[in-house]
Image (cartoon, rainbow, N blue to C red):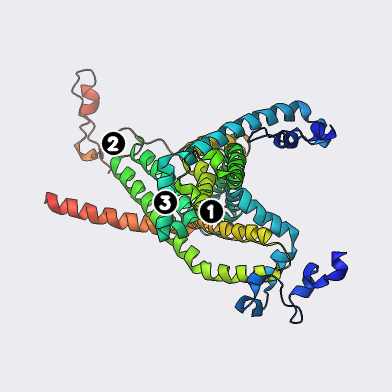
């Protein structure tokens, strides 16, 4: 009965009720109940609906074909986290390039220059990210071996979770560092230089054609 | 009780000595012979570091957002202010504030959007691992063939919101930066000098004719020749 009051989610689970998102109620947080209760209800409903949606996606043929193709390709499978980060950057950079090209406040030449620069920034950043990630892999593998050795007394399940965390954190940190820090600080001036050279060459060609 | 019987298995200090080899079968051989680095020891012993690793595994999108806030609120503004630039100090300050603003907005939006998604993905992951058939109706499905397929599927489902919400999150961040800078940091972007709508042709003073054609002023300008003596 006590369990019922403290942890209805646990009780629901024990009763075999299938629900994805029930939040256990902490008795210490009663002061915040007027706010936390509707928030938790909303979150539970939302989580439940999203989980059902994700479950449906997992059951779709296209998704399973996609997983099969990912597993069959060594590159896609080995760099899954990195490839997902790159997909994110393609969408974001593509959106910004599209916005630049349709910006009516800028003249056409300026639009093209900026769009080329944004494309170069994205390309260089992606190359740098993959290169750094691959370069650091060996060191991270050595670190993981030593980490496993130092954690030998712990259960294998916990160690596997930490190891997965190290790998995910490594890729996220490298890609974030490159896209958010190295790209604006280091890559943008290089991209501007390359973009200007391309434009100068194009201008020279056009002028040559007119003559 | 267990402590008394087998201290080397419980106490970590016994595990790295040559007298007590690690008991875990996976760590025998070449790895066991290597000395344990300080960093590995730190991660093995520090509970906070382990919590960070657990957080990265369970909430990799929020981990990314947290790391991004360190870059956008600390590293980038510092580099903007320190590195030499053609911009003046005010512009540098504005750029630094813009970076901080985008970091805060990005983190806020990520937390708001990704929290329910990560919770849902975690629950789906648990449900698939517990009973895959409950979620996937087709028994001959590719996902059910081995655990690796399920692991890849859950990784993709985990990061799917990041890809799906990339564009709306970007648009919202760009739209929210100016009001955040104005009302939180008290900064407004200085407007560029208004450009002239037309290009004014150069004036050639040599062609100006001071001799008026109207009869009223004719006498006045008839006597004026211009020029500097």
Quadrant containing the N terminus of chain B is bottom right
Q: Is residue B66 visible?
A: no
For disc 1, the marked residue is B147
Q: Chain letter of disc 1?
A: B
| Residue farthest to the front, as pictured | B139
Query: Toward which corner of the image does residue A45 lie, by quadrant?
Result: top right
Q: Chain letter of disc 2?
A: B
Front residue of A45/B163: it is A45
Instruction: Give above or below for B61 relative to B177.
Output: below
Q: CA distance from mark 3 to mark 2?
A: 65 Å
Looking at the rendered structure, which numbered label has been put on residue A68?
3
Instruction: Give above or below for B199 relative to B60.
Output: above
Look at 54% across and 46% down and name the residue there: B158
Q: Chain letter of disc 3?
A: A
Q: Around disc 3, counting alpha carbons within 10 Å, would you say few (fewer than 14), some (14 to 19), or many (20 or more)?
A: some
Front residue of A2/A124: it is A2
B208 left or right, relative to A101: left
Look at 52% across and 59% down and name the residue there: B84
Q: Around disc 2, counting alpha carbons within 10 Å, would you say few (fewer than 14), some (14 to 19), or many (20 or more)?
A: few
Q: CA distance from mark 3 to mark 1?
A: 13 Å
Q: CA distance from mark 1 to mark 2?
A: 73 Å
For disc 2, the marked residue is B200
């Amino acid at each position: 009965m006590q369990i019922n009051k403290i942890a209805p989610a646990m009780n629901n689970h024990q009763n075999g009720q299938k629900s994805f998102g029930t939040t256990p109620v902490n008795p210490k947080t009663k002061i915040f109940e007027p706010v936390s209760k509707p928030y938790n209800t909303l979150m539970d409903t939302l989580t439940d609906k999203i989980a059902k949606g994700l479950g449906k996606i997992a059951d779709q043929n296209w998704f399973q074909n996609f997983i099969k193709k990912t597993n069959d390709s060594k590159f896609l499978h080995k760099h899954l986290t990195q490839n997902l980060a790159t997909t994110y950057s393609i969408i974001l950079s593509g959106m910004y390039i599209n916005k630049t090209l349709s910006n009516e406040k800028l003249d056409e030449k300026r639009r093209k220059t900026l769009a080329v620069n944004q494309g170069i920034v994205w390309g260089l950043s992606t190359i740098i990210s993959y290169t750094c990630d691959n370069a650091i892999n060996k060191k991270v593998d050595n670190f993981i071996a030593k980490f496993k050795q130092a954690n030998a007394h712990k259960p294998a399940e916990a160690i596997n979770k930490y190891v997965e965390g190290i790998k995910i954190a490594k890729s996220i940190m490298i890609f974030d560092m490159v896209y958010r820090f190295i790209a604006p600080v280091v890559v943008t001036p290089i991209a501007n230089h390359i973009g200007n050279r391309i434009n100068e060459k194009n201008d020279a060609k056009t002028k040559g054609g007119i003559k | 009780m267990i402590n008394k019987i087998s201290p080397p298995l419980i106490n970590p200090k016994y595990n790295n000595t040559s007298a007590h080899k690690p008991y875990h079968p996976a760590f025998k051989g070449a790895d066991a012979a290597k000395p344990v680095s300080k960093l590995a020891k730190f991660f093995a012993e520090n509970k906070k570091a382990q919590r960070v690793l657990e957080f990265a595994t369970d909430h990799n999108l929020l981990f990314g957002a947290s790391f991004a806030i360190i870059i956008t609120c600390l590293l980038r503004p510092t580099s903007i202010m320190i590195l030499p630039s053609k911009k003046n100090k005010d512009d540098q300050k504005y750029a630094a504030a813009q970076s901080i603003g985008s970091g805060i907005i990005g983190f806020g939006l990520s937390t708001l959007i990704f929290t329910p998604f990560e919770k849902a993905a975690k629950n789906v992951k648990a449900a698939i691992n517990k009973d895959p058939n409950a979620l996937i109706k087709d028994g001959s499905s590719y996902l059910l063939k081995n655990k690796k397929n399920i692991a890849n599927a859950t990784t993709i489902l985990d990061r799917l919101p990041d890809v799906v919400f990339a564009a709306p999150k970007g648009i919202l961040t760009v739209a929210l930066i100016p009001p955040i800078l104005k009302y939180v940091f008290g900064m407004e972007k200085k407007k560029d000098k208004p450009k002239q709508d037309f290009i004014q042709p150069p004036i050639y003073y040599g062609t100006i004719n001071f001799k008026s054609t109207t009869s009223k002023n004719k006498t006045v300008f008839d006597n004026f020749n211009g020029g500097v003596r």
